[in-house]
Amino acid sequence: MLLGTQKINTRGRLEIGGCDALELAEQFGTPLYVLDETALRLRCREYRTAFENLKPDTDIVYAGKAALNRALCQIIAEEGLGLDAASGGELYTALQAGFPPARIHLHGVYKTDAELQMAIEAGVGAIVVDNFEEIERLVNLLTSLPCAPSDGKASSNLPTTTARKADAEFPILLRIAPEVDAETHPLIRTGQRDSKFGFHLLNGDAYRAVERILGDPRLRLIGFHCHIGSQISDLSAFAAAVQAMATFAQSVQQRYGYVAPLLNIGGGLAVRYVPEDNPPAVKEYARTLVDALRAACRQYGFPEPALGVEPGRSLIAEAGITLYRVGAVKHVPHEHPDLPREYLIVDGGVSDNPRPQMYGARYTAVHVGRRAEPHTHPYRILGKHCETDPIIDCAMLPETRAGDVIALLTTGAYAYSMSSQYNRYPRPAMVAVRDGNARIIVERETYDDVLRNDR
Ligand SMILES: Cc1ncc(COP(=O)(O)O)c(C=O)c1O
């Protein structure tokens, strides 16, 4: 579990991005999110190379819900990926960071009018439409929002850069529930028959949505989208999603003569949280998608569309760690056969990472100052909040004392982005490390930040 640039340095400590992790904890305080910028950039390039070698017209779009801030937007833009923004806040972050709007997709199962308007005015690359109500609200907005006349001159109240031409069609992707039941935690499974996401196939909604969109001069359907879930290791589930989408695209062509130029299969590739995890390589994942697409196109005599993918977790999870300081070591007289009796209470927990509580998510912890020593002593690691918030039920560490720093590995995705101020704890800072340098990319919140919105 020495992920990314992690190493054991000459002092026997954990090093990440060329920085001694114990010194990071001392310099920036704990809890601390640490982002291995090199690991993230290399992973972006691994994705690009894997698809460029097999199918160069693949659109790789980072799912910003995994983690997003200005610096991350800049890194993702520099690495040439697109961005999936799943809310007004994510879209606003990306626009403020100068992310090219044409490379942004707006997602969401309930986009408000304000969110749709922000996307329209910014000129995002696509809105991924999820339901009939949204189509009608989108069309109304496209009709009512001020437009530049078709000669390209801006209307009075919009700057030229954001004004749409009056006769422009807005690019949209249609989200489909592909009825693929991927093996993962039920709360992160999204493509099955009872999913709340997208238009369903069996009841005909997906076809009715296509009809509605093709019949509207303000909308330009650029393809179909699905997302079957997250932390998926079984590549056959992705192949099944491609097959389902190609089958749908082919029957749309037969019914309406519309040939989809793009099939976006979403994200979902698994990562390594514990040593037993063995996620497929990005190369294998790319090969699976491309082979499945080509096989389906051959089967149907369907022209090969471009492919889209939306990795979140598999781009950034392994590039992140969280540093915690141990505050207390308790010897607890319980009788559970599977739980260690020694508890480590650390200075973080459910407010900086709710995944263990929400999904029973598993993690690996390492001793930062004594990374080189055998990790053979069992501890239960718990947070500091007013609930029983185990972070790891049975972690193996060297003998650990109050004041020691431990690192939770693989916390780059869905930790900061799901954090809260529970118990009125300010959120930790995030530092990006690279080639021995550390820079704060998100400041630690203060007590005044906690109070900011109180009246
Ligand atoms: C539509 C969509 N695309 C992409 C993703 C990213 O998934 P992952 O982080 O598993 O790659 C998600 C995650 O929820 C999603 O809902």
Image (spheres, rainbow, N blue to C red):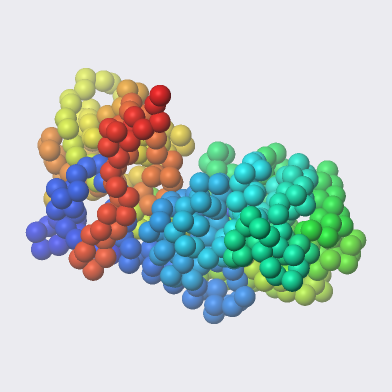
Residue at 32% of width from left, 50% of height from top? 442
Q: Along the horizontal axis of the image, is 214 left or right of 79? A: right
Residue at 40% of width from left, 24% of height from top? 455
Asked where in the image residue 248 lies, by quadrant, the reply is bottom right
In the image, residue 149 above or below residue 452: below
Q: Along the horizontal axis of the image, is 26 left or right of 45? A: left
Residue at 77% of width from left, 47% of height from top? 140
| Quadrant (top left, top right, bottom left, bottom right) of the N terminus | bottom left
How many numbered discs sit on the rendered protein?
0
Q: Which residue lies furthest to the right in this view?
A: 255
In the image, residue 163 above or below residue 429: below
In the image, residue 59 above or below residue 358: below
Q: Which residue lies furthest to the left in this view?
A: 11
Asked where in the image residue 133 lies, by quadrant, the reply is top right
Give the x, y percent position of residue 83.
53, 60
Asked where in the image residue 318 lies, by quadrant, the reply is bottom left
Give the x, y percent position of residue 141.
73, 49
Residue at 19% of width from left, 44% of height from top? 29
- Comparing 77 with 52, the one in front is 77
Give the x, y percent position of residue 31.
25, 42
Say whether residue 10 is visible. yes
- Comparing 44 with 375, the one in front is 44
Say whether residue 376 is visible. no
